[in-house]
Amino acid sequence: MRIRSIGLCPVLALIALTVADAPAVLAQAKTVLTYSADGRLIFPKDYRSWVYLSSGMNMSYAADAATRPNRFENVFVNPEAHSAFLKTGTWPDKTIFVLEIRAAEQNGSINKNGFFQAAAGNREAHVKDSRLKGGWGFFAFEGEAPARLIPQTADCYSCHEAHGATDTTFVQFYPTLLPIAVEKKTLSAGYLADEAAPKSAAHP
């Protein structure tokens, strides 16, 4: 791109170039889904700069879930996937979600009621990759070491397939995205059946 500077000092010309080229620069900053040589997913260290979707606290999809310490679960998704979802109501190939689990604490600083987030614990990824069987895969990280694919016989796959609102993902728990899926008519049959069922009925 050429910029003709008429009466602009070099500094202003540089500013004009920077602003004009900003969209092109940003377009190059895409998330890269990377695997190690043995097929492990490389930990995305910058995930906290991605799009934050929502947080849950002590959520469980089983009515008889074992009691466990209070915790928050934060969900992030790579920006390119989020932008695509806003346009189409579905997730593009190479989408990657990161679920970050953090301790929920009450006693700290001046807090007198409720909970706040504390130290991070486990992190998991949900990846859409056409190279994977079924097109989606789950990975559980230990620290920041590359993660192996969770076997596709695990319950998380069948649960997401049966109950995910859109494209096997729990968009029903992402309040800024559910209206998009409704508008684009991309809600799954399984989710619509869940919504139509009596609310007292628990998922298996």
Image (cartoon, rainbow, N blue to C red):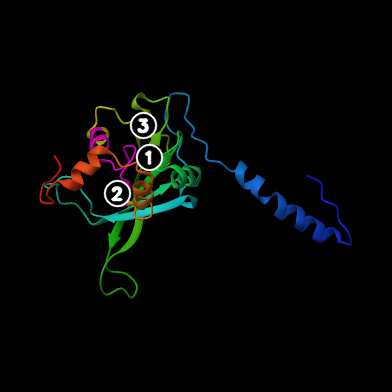
Q: Which residue is mark 3?
A: 136
Give the label, 2 or 3, closer to the camera.
2
At numbered mark 1, what does the secondary structure look like: helix, strand or loop? strand
> Which amino acid type is marked by label 3?
Trp
User: Which comes sooner in the sequence, label 2 or label 1?
Assistant: 1
Q: CA distance from mark 2 to mark 3?
A: 18 Å
Q: Is residue 138 left or right of residue 96?
A: left
**Residue at 48% of width from left, 24% of height from top?**
37
Toward the viewer: 144 or 1?
A: 1
Q: Which mark is residue 178?
A: none
Q: CA distance from mark 1 to mark 3?
A: 10 Å
Report the magenta residues as a range: 158-173
Q: In which quadrant of the rendered view does residue 127 lie? A: top left
Image quarter hosting the N terminus? top right
Q: Which residue is mark 1?
A: 125
Q: Is disc 1 surrounded by few (<14), some (14 to 19) or many (20+) residues within 10 Å?
A: many
